[in-house]
Amino acid sequence: MELTLAILVICIKLALIAGVLLLLPVPLTWLERKVAGHMQQRLGPMRVGWHGLLQPIADGIKLLTKEDTIPAGADRLLFKIAPIVALVPSFVVFITIPFGENVTVLGHEITLAVSNLNIGLLFILAVIGLEVFGVILAGWASNSKYALLGGLRTCAQMISYEIPMGFAVIGVIMLAQSMNLAEIVEAQSEVWFIVYQPIGFLVFLIAGLAECQRVPFDLAEAEGDLGAGYHTEYSGMRFSLFMMNEYIIMVLISVLCVLLFFGGWHGILLPLPPLVWFLLKVALVIYLFMWFRFTFPRYRYDQLMTIGWKVLLPLSLANILITGLLL
């Protein structure tokens, strides 16, 4: 009986996470357009529904009905599976994300995570790195020089920035003495790690921007010189899977920023429920990502590599040394 109940709870958690992640791009695309409009002193989407609320639905219908083209010389199998290979790791990592403290339902204690792994942080960093294989497959299978070059530069960008991102969280692990995300949050019950790790947070945030290919690190989708990069030849729903992956990675980086540096579900001053605090903090970081997009210009590729290898990597290593000396 207990085993059946545990399996049922896990299935419900998985269904909730999958459903939320699949639907997240709908409000986020609308919100991003509205943020852009207000920052540029215009209204943003207004025509489809009240204040353009139905615009994402219209976009979804367009993508569903748009012709799905495959280049004549493309590797059809790899071309078809590349968006899925890029998207799956983004979903898998959320099974280790804790969304709050344990809750009691009908006398049973339920954790707000699918799996409370002792090495949850290491699992996330390892699995999210697999996303690059989808990019490589998309560029190679398209049989297009533009897509191939876009895939290569995207691959180099993602690998370059995953290294300082991994080093940036070592200071947090040293302070919490754990790679379990729930234990890292509990270690911040009194003082958030942003107080002790401002350099680590800065490196993690910048590397996260590059990881999800957001401005000013959107070299993967530099329309002016690449025609969209590794997904140049994609259309319809296959193209939308790449865009969905970008938004899910943005949410993941925002969630990790909150869990690692801003106390997770621990709040200050206002007596709000832990889950509400957690979601408010994540929403604030997501807004920060959107704010950056409409504020900063895109870097050149040599500048992107310089920032990754000559600025962020030394800073992350210095942060580890300073943390070790002060502990």
Image (spheres, grey):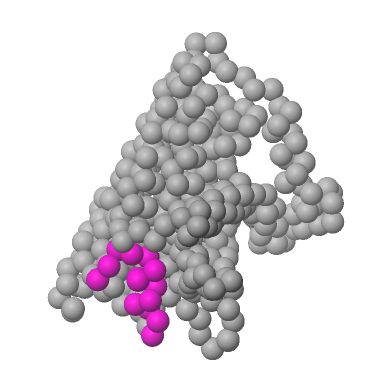
Give the farthest residue toward the left. 325
Q: So how many labels did they put on this image?
A: 0
Give the image quarter of residue 89.
Answer: top left
Answer left or right for 158 relative to 34: left
- In this rendering, does residue 217 appear at all? no
- Residue located 74% across and 54% down the image: 44
Give the farthest residue toward the top. 72
- In this rendering, does residue 59 appear at all? yes
Instruction: Inspect the magenta stretch and tell me whether residue 205 lies in it.
Output: no
* Position of residue 109 measured from the top left corner of the image (x, y, whole percent): 49, 70
Answer left or right for 327 relative to 193: left
Give the image quarter of residue 201.
Answer: bottom left
Instruction: Give the vertical position of 281 relative to 305 (above or below).
Output: below
* Position of residue 285 measured from the top left corner of the image (x, y, whole percent): 52, 65
Give the farthest residue toward the front. 1
- Residue located 18% across and 78% down the image: 327
Most foreground residue, 112 or 262? 112
Most foreground residue, 197 or 282? 282
Instruction: Give the vertical position of 144 relative to 301 (above or below).
Output: above
* Position of residue 253 measured from the top left corner of the image (x, y, whole percent): 45, 57
- Residue located 71% across and 27% down the image: 66
Instruction: Give the vertical position of 92 relative to 188 (above or below).
Output: above
* Position of residue 158 measured from the top left corner of the image (x, y, whole percent): 37, 43
Residue range corresponding to the magenta coloring: 177-190
